[in-house]
Structures are given as structure tokens and as C-alpha cells.
Image: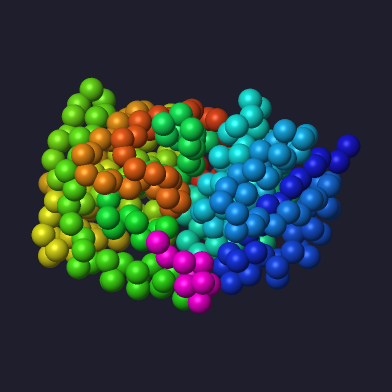
Amino acid sequence: MQKKAMIIYNPAAGKNKFRKLLPDAEKILTEADFEVTLVPSTPVPKSTTAIAKHAAENGFDIVIAAGGDGTVNEVVNGLMQVENPPKLGILPVGTTNDYARALNCAKNPLEALHIIAKQETVRVDIGKANETEFFINNAAGGKITEITYAVKESMKSKWGRLAYLFSGLTMLPNLSPIQVEITYNDKIFSGEILLFFVNKSNSIGGMETLCPPAELNSGMFELLILKKVSPKKLFQLFASIKKGTHLNSPYVIHTRTNKVTIKSEADLNVSYDGVYGGKAPYTIEVIPEALEVFADKNRISARLRG
């Protein structure tokens, strides 16, 4: 019996990359005995979430997110609204494709299609924020993290990942620390920070060495807090990310936890998988192994709990 597969695609993602991939996608999945339904997202806020929820409620066996991290996030939010969600497939046709990087298939959407066709899956953790929002890769806060959702689709289509660099350069003069209170593991950090990350994978903003210890199914987050530093120290820290030595910096707090609470009297914007979520306060918790995701286990063994 054929399995029902819905591909939800972002028509604007990655310079319309999916349109070129469409014939291959239908052929490969049909040959793998999937009945394929194609549905484009729309500019209406959370349209992708609504489509994914509809698929989950109407008997689809798998839902494939074809786009970037924002598309994946919205699909995850739709799937997590049902008790037994369909399996999740990811076709990396966006700009950064962080979670696809964690699955080691970000550079070749055709390769990702063949992985889905083989039907091998892993169960991965999902983050839950304030009981209503979900994320699969990371939650983040601080002025510099606003770049991820401030960049317009038109800029990403034109410049690709360079669009984030251009946007970041314009934000540097206004990069100021913010006073926060972050609770984790019965500890409280209170002070000024530039940013924080609550990670489920190693890759954020295309930087695959940002959090090397992260495991997709550990039942724990990797919490990174960057304290207030001078611009010079900040550049040195960013330079050390490539070597993976930044976690040893006295300006970085790194720990493993399954729950984080963030409070701030100032405006602190929080994003999930690069999508704007809202303003603090936030309570963020792990839901262990909440979703089945198509992946080649051998290729990502280092990112799975042993």
C-alpha cells in the first residue's frame, strides 16, 4: 500500500531552487512507493504550520519541508499539534539550512531525497517554549540574533548567506548588552549578555562548530551564554568559533540542561530556528525524541546519543 507524502514548499526559498528540483522529487518519491501531494506555502503568517497540521490530521504518513530553517520550523509546529505526528523529511533548499547541516545533507537536496526514499529514520528531540511554540534546532536571544529574521526574503534570494553579513554590519553600531536572568540546573545567571543560544544541534547560522557537543536525541539542550564583552573581544570570540575553542572562553557559559527560563526587564526578543517568536519571559523545555526524522544514521552517528 502506498504511503501518503505531502511536500510543503516555500516558493521563494533559495532562489526558487525547489521548482528546479520538482521533477526529480516526484520521480524519486513515487519510485519509493509514495503518493506525493505538493502544497506551496503562502505569505500569510503561519500558513505552513496550518498546512502541516492539516496533513497530520488527515492521514499523511510523512510531511516534507522543502525550504530553509523557517519552513522547517513552521512544519514542526504544525506536526507537534497532534498526538502521533507523521514522519518529517527535510529538503534543504533555503539559504542556511542549519538542521539539514546537522543531518549532514545540507549541500545536496537530491541526496536528501534519496535519504527520504530509503525510509530510515531517527527519533529527535524537540524544544517547547511557553507551552505553545516548538523548535527543532535552537532558540536564541540578543540583539545580534535578530539578524536571522530581520533579513527580507528578497535579500536572501539576491545575496544568499551574504545577506546576513550585510545585515549584521548595519546592526553592529547598535549592538548593546542586555540585562537578563537565566535559570538552568537550579542555577541563576544574572548579568549583562550579548546573546544566548539554547541548542539542539551543532549548527547555527551556518556555523557548524558553534556547538560541537550537541546531540539530536540526548534529551538535553546545550545552553550557550555570551557575556558582555568589548567589540575587540567579540571579534576574537567569533574568530575562535571556527577552531571550536570558544566554549573555553571566560566570557562564555556553556552547560547542558533540559530546561531554561529567561527573564528580562528590558525588551529581549527571542527567536526559534531563526523565526521571530516573541519577547521574554520564556520557559524552554525539551521533549525527548518527539519526532521521527528521515536521516542516514551512519552519517550522523557523532550527533546521536551513544
Name the one closer to the observer, 185 or 305.
185
Name the one closer to the observer, 40 or 14.
40
Compared with residue 74, is residue 91 higher up or lower down, i.e. above or below? below
The outermost residue toward the right is 1
Residue depicted at 53% across the width and 30% down the height: 289
Residue 136 is one of the magenta-drawn residues: no
Quadrant for the N terminus in the image: top right
| Left-right relation of 152 to 243 | right
Residue depicted at 64% across the width and 43% down the height: 50
Residue depicted at 15% across the width and 36% down the height: 190
Compared with residue 189, is residue 194 higher up or lower down, i.e. above or below? below
The outermost residue toward the top is 186
Residue 120 percent coordinates (x, y): 66, 41
Residue 154 percent coordinates (x, y): 51, 72
- Magenta segment range? 150-158
Name the one closer to the observer, 183 or 47.
47
| Left-right relation of 186 to 206 | left
Residue 229 appears in the figure: yes
Q: Quadrant of residue 54?
A: top right
Name the one closer to the observer, 279 or 175.
279
Q: Quadrant of residue 93?
A: bottom right
Give the main secondary structure, helix, strand or loop, of the magenta stretch. helix
